[in-house]
Image: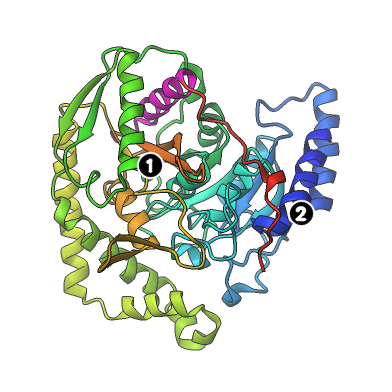
Amino acid sequence: MELVESSLGRIKETEPAINAFATVTEESALRQAAAAAQEIANGHYRGPLHGIPLGVKDLYDTAGVLTTSSSRVRADYVPDADSVAVAKLTAAGMIVVGKTHTHEFAFGATTPTTRNPWDTSKVPGGSSGGSGAAVASGSVTVALGSDTGGSIRIPASVCGTVGLKPTYGRAPRCGVASLSWSLDHVGPLTRNVREAALVMAAMSGYDRRDPASVDLPAPDWSADLDGSVAGVRIGIPVNFYNERVQPEAWSAAMSAADVVASLGAELVKVEIPMAETIMAAEWTIMLAEASSYHQEALRDTPELFTDEVRVLLEAGEAVLATSYINALRSRTLMQAGWKDMFRDIDVLLAPTVPGPGVDAENPVFAWAADDVEAATSAYSRVCAPANLTGLPAISVPVAFTAEGGLPLGAQVIGKPFCEGDVIRIAAAYEAATDHVGRVAPMSMRVSSVS
């Protein structure tokens, strides 16, 4: 009860400044907390997640609770049943305290409704920006996200939290609004690595209603976090991940690599295959599949979409079938290329995003006077390879910028269904440093979101 009350109190304290939550479920959360307390008192302890407050990205269906995808298109949508992920976590005893904002239908990486707890003039990343902001502000220790082009890892990096994207097919996505079904993943944003391991295991498992779901058991990834990383081969990219990335972001990731190397890991330089085709394939697949998913609403009520998302959906309708098929072929070749690359390494380590949270009023990266890149494009560019290949990836905080003290993250990408490897490397880094687990000093922030 005290934990849930504390969470709800922190939400009330921080919400005027960051607007992380679309809906707060105070009454039901307090009822569930009382029930959980009684269960535990009676000896019916469900495990380490029992009684823990949970924020849920507003893409996930929650029975009887408004689920808008932060869009007017679904302004009145109240599902009858929980998404599989929410059902699994509530069965483990977690208590939903609210629904967190997303970039509309997850189609963007800035989440305009929400602000960054470290500096409310900055974006929280996206599309799971509300989840990242909620965890970073201390409102919850766990919030759910989805990741199609980096949408768990981007806000994790920008808000200074841990964000875990599993292997494609590891966790069922039933009851979660889709952006691009062949790129979508679900996973948690958390305060630390152990929490991510616990929640990811509870979310995982086969479900026949998800065509991508793979019938594999989910190990207890939290059980091996104190293991040695000696001899682990960590790939350091010599291309792509070091291009159009701010020097401070690259330096932070390389410093993290040096920390893990000091623990006994081996750093191996690798070249990212087919780097020149990554973003063309990502955007072609995502645009086409998103437009297909939203086709009916785009025909019937186009005015209900934001201008930004409506334009992207309309662009998706212009993607040729031949272009889509060629992008799928490119992805297959890319997956084969990454499989070859991973013959020489166990994991890859790189910056999560090209830089920290950008200005909310002008969300761009200015690489030169005549070279400006939209933040959504820049953020997703560095994350997209793990979506195209479907490989597991975790982002952890590794530094804070010299100017402004904004978080920077590094991501560890592993082999298929080797979540344990990326979690173990991230946990080793976490134990050796003090960057992971910090809460934004919200008491110093007085501006509010209009």
Instruction: State which tag comes first along the sequence, 1 or 2.
Output: 2
* Viewer-closest of 114 and 394: 114
Query: Could you say where residue 292 lies in the image, as x and y percent from the top left?
Result: 37, 74
Q: How far apart are marks 1 and 2 (CA)?
A: 33 Å
Query: Which quarter of the picture shows residue 198?
Result: top right
Magenta includes 430?
yes
Quadrant in which the N terminus appears: top right
Check disc 1 and report its element: helix, strand or loop: loop
Q: Residue at x 66, y 31 (%)?
A: 49
Residue at mark 1 = 214
* Mark 1 crowdedness (10 Å alpha carbons): few <14, some 14-19, many ≥20: some
Q: Residue at x 50, y 87 (%)?
A: 300
Task: Kindly identify the amino acid type of the residue bearing the numbered disc 1.
Answer: Val
User: Range of the magenta residues?
Assistant: 415-432
On whether residue 207 falls in the magenta region, the answer is no
Q: Looking at the picture, how far across and down is residue 228, in whole percent?
A: 38, 12
Between residues 166 and 304, which one lies in front from this camera angle? 304
Q: Residue 399 placed where, x, y %?
A: 44, 34
Amino acid tagged 2: Thr
Residue 206 appears in the figure: no
Question: Quadrant of the rendered structure where residue 82 is?
Answer: bottom right
- The residue at 44%/64% (across/down) is 363
Q: Mark 2 points at which residue?
A: 25
User: Is the C-beta separation of discs 1 and 2 under 8 Å?
Assistant: no
Is residue 337 shown to the viewer in this render? yes
Judging from the image, what secondary structure is the residue with disc 2 in?
A: loop
- Magenta span main SS: helix
How far across and down, in percent of the image, does residue 248 sit?
35, 41
**Of the numbered discs in the image, which one, if any, rests on residue 369?**
none
